[in-house]
């Protein structure tokens, strides 16, 4: 099974890692940890495309920090998984939900695991806009991990239509 784990640099990431380790530690899995660096403004994007300027340096620092952060999480996850199970790390730049969906397709993910704080309009459902976009458009199963709750869009026994995924 291939699992794409979308990681944000917040307090919920350890909960997501612990969830993956607990649920999949005894299964044959390939895990890919993904962090998406989002340019903070049009200026960042334009400057990074040109490859120069202070904004490009800031963006490079954010990418390096994210890579170091994911490598720390990778070590933690590897210590909780079967020794032979590979854990890959990827830091990409772009719009988070689009990058997550593209990466899942390219990776051939069977499952996307993503955390959610429940901010924004969907807070009553305990998921955020990135999680909702991934949940709504993914071609594979999606599990949303909240601090004390887990929302899944697919049960092992049956596949839910996209319109019913929020109810699972």
Image: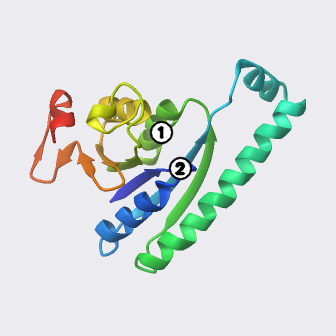
Q: Residue at x 71, y 46 (%)?
A: 63
Q: In this rendering, would 30 be left or right of 9?
A: left
Tell me the SS state at disc 1: helix
Would residue 109 be visible to someone looking at this image? no
User: Observer-nearest residue: 67 or 13?
Assistant: 13
User: Observer-nearest residue: 147 or 50?
Assistant: 147
Q: Relative to 1, does residue 109 appear above or below in the rendering?
A: above
Q: Residue pushed farthest right?
A: 53
Residue denoted by label 1:
100
Task: Say which quarter of the image contains residue 89.
Answer: bottom right
Q: In this rendering, would 28 be left or right of 75?
A: left
User: Which quarter of the image is occupied by the C terminus?
Assistant: top left
Residue 34: mark in rendering: 2
Q: Residue at x 41, y 60 (%)?
A: 15
- Provide residue 92's location: percent of width, then percent of height: 62, 42
- Provide residue 103's location: percent of width, then percent of height: 49, 41
């Amino acid at each position: 099974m291939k699992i794409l784990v979308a990681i944000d640099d917040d307090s919920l990431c350890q909960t997501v890692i612990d969830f993956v380790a607990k649920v999949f530690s005894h299964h044959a899995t390939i895990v890919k940890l993904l962090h998406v660096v989002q340019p903070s403004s049009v200026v960042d994007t334009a400057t990074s495309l040109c490859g120069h300027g202070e904004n490009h340096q800031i963006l490079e620092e954010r990418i390096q920090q994210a890579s170091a952060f994911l490598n720390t999480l990778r070590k933690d996850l590897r210590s909780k998984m079967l020794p032979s199970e590979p854990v890959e790390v990827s830091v990409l730049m772009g719009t988070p939900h689009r990058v997550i969906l593209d990466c899942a397709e390219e990776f051939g993910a069977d499952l996307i695991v993503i955390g959610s704080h429940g901010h924004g309009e969907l807070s009553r459902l305990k998921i955020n806009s990135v999680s909702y976009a991934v949940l709504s458009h993914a071609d594979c199963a999606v599990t949303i991990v909240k601090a004390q709750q887990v929302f899944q869009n697919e049960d092992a026994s049956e596949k839910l239509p996209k319109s019913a995924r929020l109810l699972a």
